[in-house]
Amino acid sequence: MAHMRRRADGYGLGVAVDALQGRRILVTGASSGVGAATAAACVEAGARVALLARRADRIHALAGDLGEAAVATPADVRDEGEVRRAVAGAAERLDGLDGLVNAAGINWAAPLADGTVAQWRDMLETNLLGAFAVTQAALPHLIRAGGADILTVSSMSGRRVLSPAMGVYAATKAGLSRWTEALWLEVADRGVRVMLLSPGLIATDFAERTVDPQQRAANRSRLAETGLDPAEVAAQIAYMIGRPRNVRLGDVTILPTAQQH
């Protein structure tokens, strides 16, 4: 977790150490990758965070690393009951919520002919329905806080498809992007700022669910060589949340310079 200990402004994005001072932010997908790095960046910038993910051991370990500013709230975003209990618990332990980062996501990469309904359902329920459920559960707390933020991590795959193996994943991310537009229309006059971040390739374990073994190895190599460090994406998230209330970075793209398609 060495990369998580970098300062949130370590990439020249201008995030002051106290930019999120006093904020109470719920981060989903916090057991690894962008979610875990975002939790660390928010704490570094002065926030308290609640870590939500299905892998309880990982978020408890991360909360321990981050100290008193972090609490673990295990839940599977595919389970509505678990989500509601975890969000309520996060709000109670942080004395409210004024920020939500939807970063949970998975990708079973396979062409339609090789995929399974179970894999498609897993992506839909995690990437799309999970964000819906967490946001719905958190919304009353965010509205009550006044001056709150919802930032959803989509993907460049929501804008164009890299390969046939990315079709279903891209469909979930395109849906997530369009839903974020509708959410902004719904809550804009209720003190909740809604933003979307669409990253390109990120150096995570994202390739591990690629169904074809040869393609899995190729994807793993490409992510390692080209992908952004999750901490770089997390720094962008902390920067967006930390902007003055009269500024909304509504739909932002972040790409590795080496990524051409």
Image: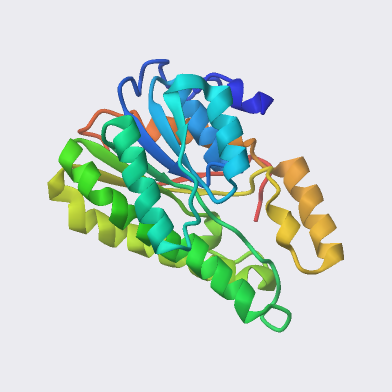
Left or right, residue 43 beside residue 241 = right
Count the marks: 0
Q: Quadrant of residue 107?
A: bottom right
Q: Quadrant of residue 180?
A: bottom left
Residue 257 image offset from top left, x and y in percent: 64, 40
Pick the quarter of the image with the N terminus: top right
Q: Residue at x 56, y 67 (%)?
A: 123
Q: In this orientation, does residue 131 appear?
A: no
Left or right, residue 111 beside residue 18 = right
Pick the quarter of the image with the C terminus: bottom right
Q: Residue at x 66, y 51 (%)?
A: 260
Residue 144 image offset from top left, x and y in percent: 16, 41
**From this viewpoint, which residue is outermost toward the top?**
17
Q: Residue at x 49, y 33 (%)?
A: 39
**From this viewpoint, which residue is outermost toward the left?**
189
Residue 142 image offset from top left, x and y in percent: 24, 43
> By what rule are the colours in the image chosen?
rainbow
Left or right, residue 110 beside residue 138 = right
47 or 213, nearer to the observer? 47
Q: In this orientation, does residue 70 appear?
A: yes
Q: Residue at x 35, y 42 (%)?
A: 89
**From this viewpoint, which residue is outermost toward the right?**
214
Q: Is residue 184 above or below residue 248?
A: below
Residue 91 image offset from top left, x and y in percent: 30, 39
Q: Is residue 181 above or below residue 121?
A: above
227 or 28, nearer to the observer? 28
